[in-house]
Image: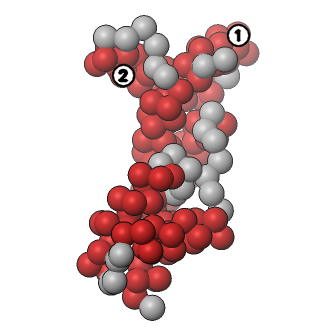
Amino acid sequence: MAIVDDVTAQMKDAMRAKDKVRLGALRSMRAAFIEAMKADGADTVPDAAAITILRRLEKQRKESITAYEAAEREDLAAPERVELGVIEAFLPSLADVATTTTWVTAAIQKSGAAGPGDMGRVMGALMGAHKGEVDGGMAKDIALKLLMG
């Protein structure tokens, strides 16, 4: 089943179960999919595009959680964590640190990077080969360590 269809089906289940927080997360996901469909004039969103949209929503939730925790607003951070869990359930898992390090090392060799100033070339090579499989923030940190050391 396509991700878009799965989100719609689970949204209906959440409505029946009266699970407001889960329903809110699923509705925001569906709204993002509909927005993408309207932009393209398409009837559906391919899974690759859906994953990109979900990664953006995931990043937004993580930023919100960080901001709420910094402001000591646990009452606002808790529902964001639940929504993040719902979004992450639809996403494929990202590579672990060891795998990411291997990929970053290969990207450094492929791009011929010599120092931190070549970070853009490294990240371009890495994301070209492994977009959607790697956490960009973690990859950037690993690349910086490897290029500095």
Q: Earlier in the sequence, mark 2 or mark 1?
A: 1
Label 2 secondary element? helix
The label number, if any, that marks residue 16 in the structure image: 1
43 to 80, vertically: above or below: above
Q: Residue furthest right?
A: 17
The label number, if any, that marks residue 36 in the structure image: 2
Which amino acid type is shown beneath numbered disc 2? Answer: Ala
Across and down, in percent, residue 113 comes to 35, 77
The residue sitting at 46% across, 83% down in the picture is 145
**Label 2 Cα crowd, 10 Å radius (few <14 / some 14-19 / many 20+):** some
Q: Quadrant of residue 60?
A: top left
The label number, if any, that marks residue 47 in the structure image: none
Q: Is residue 24 visible?
A: no
**Label 1 Cα crowd, 10 Å radius (few <14 / some 14-19 / many 20+):** few
The residue sitting at 63% across, 33% down in the picture is 90
Task: From the viewer's perspective, tell me whether residue 22 is left or right of residue 48.
Answer: right
Location of the C terminus by quadrant is bottom left
Query: Would you say the residues marked 2 and 1 are in contact, meaning their CB atoms lie under 8 Å apart?
Result: no
11 to 108, vertically: above or below: above
Label 1 secondary element? helix
Q: Quadrant of residue 137?
A: bottom left
Which amino acid type is shown beneath numbered disc 1? Answer: Arg
Across and down, in percent, residue 34 comes to 40, 16
